[in-house]
Amino acid sequence: MSERTFSIIKPDATRRNLTGKINAVIEDAGLRIVAQRRIRMNEAQAKKFYEVHAARPFYGELVEFMMSEPVVVQVLEGEGAVAKYREVMGATNPADAAPGTIRKLYAESVGENSVHGSDSQENAALEIAQFFTETDIVG
Ligand code: ATP
Ligand code: MG
């Protein structure tokens, strides 16, 4: 069934001008970019977005990183989009990521790992709603 997931092209990737190359991997995987905006995240947005990791030792560093350069927030649509995009991104740590995945190709480290993708349909809906309204999304 066609579904939506939420994606972020993270600061390490925008800094290296990789937006187009990452979008090519996304589109080649059969996912459609149905909304996209380049923003600079403020502290409140970054903290809210990674709230689930608030107790983790890397939370402060993660929030600072997400605010350090512009990011590209996206809505992706396609068959099984949540699971498919997780597969296309590869493992959190690029050292463990499969060949051809975005993180294997481009990520710099476990923290600066180029992309975010929702981990469930429920979180996808919440994350999309944090950055987009329904009229922003053109399928
Ligand atoms: P994301 O949620 O960004 O799609 P993920 O689901 O693969 O990534 P999570 O476990 O949810 O991984 O971690 C969220 C983010 O926190 C990671 O993408 C990474 O940027 C950062 N992170 C995770 N583990 C570490 C770590 N050990 N050190 C530093 N940063 C980390
Ligand atoms: Mg996650």
Image (tube, rainbow, N blue to C red):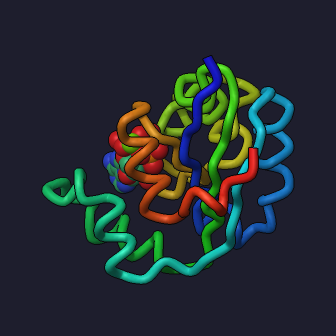
Question: In the displayed structure, does residue 51 sit left or right of residue 9?
Answer: left
Q: Position of residue 33 (x, y in %)?
A: 75, 46
Quarter of the rendered image showing ligand 2:
top left
* Image quarter of residue 26: top right
On screen, residue 46 above or below 111 = below
Q: Position of residue 127 (x, y in %)?
A: 43, 53
User: Which is more toward the observer, 47 or 128?
Assistant: 128
Q: Can residue 97 be seen by looking at this rendering? A: no
- Residue at point 62% right, 65% down? 12
- Residue at point 70% right, 48% down? 106
Q: Quadrant of the C terminus?
A: top right
Q: Residue furthest toward the front?
A: 135
Total labels drawn: 0
Q: Position of residue 59 (x, y in %)?
A: 26, 63
* Image quarter of residue 84: top right
Q: Position of residue 7 (x, y in %)?
A: 58, 49
Q: Quadrant of the N terminus?
A: top right
Q: Residue furthest toward the top?
A: 1
On screen, residue 128 above or below 120 = below
User: Which is more toward the observer, 39 or 93?
Assistant: 39
- Residue at point 45% right, 42% down? 124
